[in-house]
Image (spheres, rainbow, N blue to C red):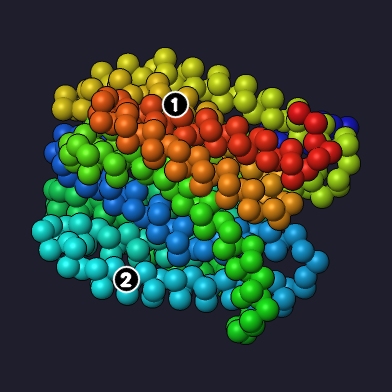
Amino acid sequence: MQILSSLKRYTKDLLVYGLGNILSFLLPVAFLPIFTNILCQEDYGLSASFLALTQIFIVVISVGSVSAVSRGFYEDWDKDEFGSYIFNGLLINAASLLIMLFFVLMLANLFSQDSSWFFITVFAVISGFLITIKDYKHKIWNLEKKSTAYAVFQNCLTFSLYFLTLILILFVFPDWRSRVYGFLIANLLFAILSLIFLLKENKPNISFEIGKIKSLLSFGAPLLLHGLGIALLASADKLLLSSLENLSSVGVLAVATAIAGIMSIPIIAVDLTLNPRIQELLKNHSVQSYLTIRKLSYLTFLTYVMSGIVLYSITPIIFKYFIGSDFQSSKDFVGYLIIGQIFYGMYRFYVRPIFFSKKTLLVTLSTFLSGILSLVIMYFLILSLQATGAAIGTMIGYFVACMMAMVFAKKANPSWKF
């Protein structure tokens, strides 16, 4: 009976998280017919560059505070102490926002040739802050196993983002600004909503505590390079292409990335379902727990491979009926990016035990080194293969990150036998 009860709970959460992320990863594909027929390749490339910069600024502004608070959720603290931890994390984020805006404004003269790059950089900084604030309550819902709240919040955010973008692109700005402004406004609204839920349910305790700041930074600061490594793996292809080739190439690659991004539906659903369970298994420190985690890793890999095969098999249909003629060459990159997504999914699995052990330096080594290696490989591949080289470089980067995370997971948890 206990096994059936656990299986039922796993299945429910898997379905809820899966359905909860469908909009997040299907809407970008559903809107491709509009984007690829209204926006030119350069506009699509510029909006993709904005999203890539946002990923980088999320890392810098968060300074690992959201991850630190997530880990603090499992400490034996009362509500006031945990609330104080959250509040001091928010203070770190506010300070990081001001520092980043100061540096961007100081370097404003670098954008004198093209003011659009200045605006998307400022908006990327602000968006990075808003997403960080939103993530606190969103991730706590996952740890509290409130899968429905998590999924509804995610769906509403995604729907609002694309609805606003659609209104703007059809009636106001038929260019890159529609995607940037729609993204910024939606994340502002949901950052405020997330704060309201955070204040109501977790009650951040307004108290500046040096000890809490040090604790947050000691856990989160080593994750800064880790986050930059992840951002490099996800964004270096677009940023390098924009500098070595042109924004048209970025736009073409971005369409392939959106289609391969459908893989995130099973990846995020499985990851969010297993995350609290893996944390509980690791807390037991038993041989049986590690055996269970090993079995879950095999099942997870099989799920991702099967999902990748299905997605790749329907890719020609997606391009035939949904993608504009200017972006048809994107289909050449989808296979490489799907394989990269499979390795990224397994990286997320293996990195959980490292986070729980608090050996965040190992997390940093696995992602930052693989991100730098990917950047170097991608540079030379782009010079010879253009956008194809960027896609292959991304795939290699995720493979290296997965392998390093698997090795370090074993090092952080010696009782774990693969």
User: What type is the residue that disc 2 sits on?
Assistant: Phe
Which residue, as the protein is rendered here, is positioned at the far bottom?
A: 207
Relative image position of residue 336 (x, y in whole percent): 40, 24
Q: Nearer the viewer, residue 314 or 46?
A: 46
Per the image, label 1 sits on a secondary structure element best described as helix
Q: Distance between the Cα atoms at labels 1 and 2?
A: 36 Å
Residue at the (40%, 59%) spot, across then down: 57
Which residue, as the protein is rendered here, is positioned at the far left?
A: 113
- Does 28 sit above or below residue 116? above
User: Which residue, given by chain and number where applicable, does mark 2 sit on?
Assistant: 103
In the picture, the disc for residue 338 is 1
Viewport quadrant of the N terminus: top right
Do tag 1 and tag 2 residues touch (Cβ < 8 Å)? no
Q: Is residue 95 left or right of residue 215?
A: left
Q: Which image quadrant for residue 219?
A: bottom right
Q: Which image quadrant for residue 203?
A: bottom right
Q: Is residue 152 left or right of residue 166?
A: right
Residue at the (61%, 36%) spot, across then down: 404
